[in-house]
Amino acid sequence: MKKIISIFAISLLATSCGGTSNTSIPVATTTTATPTTTIEKTTTTKTALTDESPTTTVISETPTTASSAPETTEENSTKIEMNEETPSVTTEEHSEPISMVLTPLPETLDFLVPHFSKHLDIWGTKIIATPETPDEKVLHAAIILAEYLDNDEDGIPDDHHVVSALAENKSMITMAATELDFEIILDTIDGFEIFDKGFTVQDLYGDETAPENGFDASLEEVHHLILNYGWGEVYPEQLRQEEGSAIADAMDIARGGHFDRTPSQYPDGAWFTYNDWTCEYDCMVTEYTYWAHTSLLGGQVDRFDEISDEWRANTPELMRSVDEYATSILQDPQLKLPTSLPDGDYRGLSTSSASTPATAAPPATATPPATTAPPATTTQITEPPISNDAKIDLINFSATPTSDLLNWANFAADKIAERTANILVVTYNIGEYVGDEIPGMPFSTNEVILSKPEIDLLMTQIEQWMLSDPCMGRNEERGHLNEELESYRFWLENGADTSTQRGLCERTRFVMMAWKDGMPTWDLQKFLVHELYHAFQRDIANDCSDIVERQGRGEYIHAVVEGAADYFTYLTADELYTDEDRKNYDRIAYKNPLDVLLRDAKDLMDEDGTNDVTGSGIATRAAVMLRLMVEKGWLSHESILDGSFHHNCARAELNPSNPEFVYAWENWFRIEEQNGVYKFEDSVLNN
């Protein structure tokens, strides 16, 4: 358990607040004076974060008398009082959808580079992480934060005052791969600079976040941050982590009395018995509030043996019977606290753009802001000017370094004359071949390498990217978006060996690729460059394809589209390699890219015994066909390499009514070896 502090440099001193025990201690009875005011409470039970159905732990000695709240006075009244210093906010300030895409640190945190390199911003609360912290751990922490703040998952924070308070306090979660890594960082940076700049910090480690076995510590550490600098700031009378607040009074009951420092022994009947001497009174309130709140949410079910040395009211039922006062505070609907435990599956990303904002005014005091009618939508898309500013984003869940994939992608993009589409590339690894075909797609099923949490995380990132896209993010594309996402999830969950480019809109492209770890780098580079070229083909997702299909030329155009991509791949990927690379990639016999292209095409013909362009390896066969047209002077080599061949539907001219195209279609396979190099036969070039 950790105490949240502001001074980053000394945070390590308070990060570990005691261990746990396997000793089972029964909950005993504590009796206090009966209050004069009855406090109403809700009784909804939520489930724990577990793959199994939660069960209630049976404790050997059930309490017979519930503890009650202190006598009601002006000091501990249940009336909700907002912190007068909390800034006034409106719903619109926090109605923008959040992004789950990792970015470099912003300029305000440059002083922490290179120790921290990854960054997310969840409605003003930052999460930063070291390069060694796995991306999926950082994103999981962000999802837990979003679920606590937007518990109904409608895409809008439940309490905008809390979100504003966190932002005003410059709240931040700092993540390292392990606690040892965090200690090393503390030895190398000036932690007091964070304090001087006003940041409030909670540390969290990758190895304790969503572990395969064990409790997810992000549920606790993220709760600490929000409690101290959000909920406690906005509702100080109820939740401030200091003596005199209602929750502190509830803790005194749970500990069997008021103790400024940890007692050597707690009174009989106490059910909160935290014994870390470094944790002073306000720290104790933080720990107590976390235990009480998450127990009400079902988060501590089945953990009694693990946590009973410090906390015993570990189920919603025990909380309602043993700790009635804390239950009444934490379940008061006016506080807008979470009523369900975060489960690592935040659904607000897909609803934020269409949801109606919730009222942001203080509880029961102000009138909800007037809503503004959304603008009328049309199906017309305003085309942006052509430029090379269109972006390529990569979500990499493969073992191949992201830097390598980005370098190859940028290499290919630099060849293209005019790039107009925003492109998302998704990569992941698969295992051994299983064999079943994916319905409706030319993919086979394979062993699934990604875990369910990783698939969920990947889908969240894909959905977030698409919702932010000018075309796919429109309300009228919602059905299209959902259909696409359903397909992607099906492919991921069945280990599909995807190799596809999908033209979602004319200027929105999606590339998904899967391969077995260990695929030769030479082949992997060609694989990526080929699919990216499809994404660069401007007319692949506009009216051109419809025109061609109506003319009955689909078979030919498919070959042309695939052939152009392989032509580009063979003729440009060569520039990525040195002679030493080719030696390492077992390409010692390499002559030149054209030789490799023609040699590979001849091998394909020998394998299946046909010289049909549409035979196995259609992309390579069709690339040879296009090369023949280039060498005959009928097609521009440069137009294929810079992508201009795919402007203005020029490819539609390659059809059976074009005698030059027919000649290439019928003679592309006339290849021979001349002095150890593969070339077209002289007769086919001279005819």
Image (cartoon, rainbow, N blue to C red):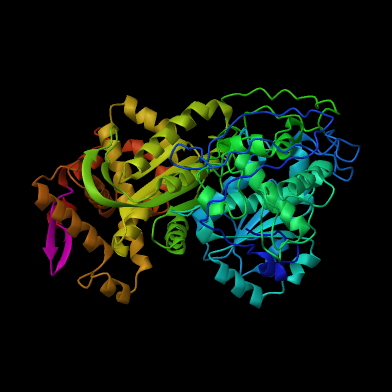
User: Residue 397 vs residue 258: left or right?
Assistant: left
Is residue 635 visible to us here?
no
* Residue 384 placement, left or right of 330: left
Q: Nearer the viewer, residue 316 or 406?
A: 316
- Along the line of sight, which residue is nearer the eye, 474 or 549? 474
**Residue 56 on image: x %, y %:** 51, 38
Q: Residue at x 81, y 31 (%)?
A: 363
Q: Residue at image x 24%, y 34%? A: 656
Q: Which residues are magenta?
A: 668-680
- Pinpoint residue 17: horizontal percent, then vertical percent: 64, 62
Left or right: 221 as drawn, with respect to 74: left
Q: Quadrant of residue 435?
A: top left
Is the residue 474 above or below the residue 414 in the image?
above
Majority secondary structure in the magenta region? strand
Residue 34 part of the magenta segment: no
Work out whether residue 59 or residue 450 is closer to the camera in this orientation and state it.
59
Q: Hey, which quadrant is residue 93 in on the image?
A: top right
Q: Where residue 343 appears, x then y in whole percent?
A: 53, 41
Can residue 206 be seen here? The reply is yes
341 in relation to 15, above or below: above
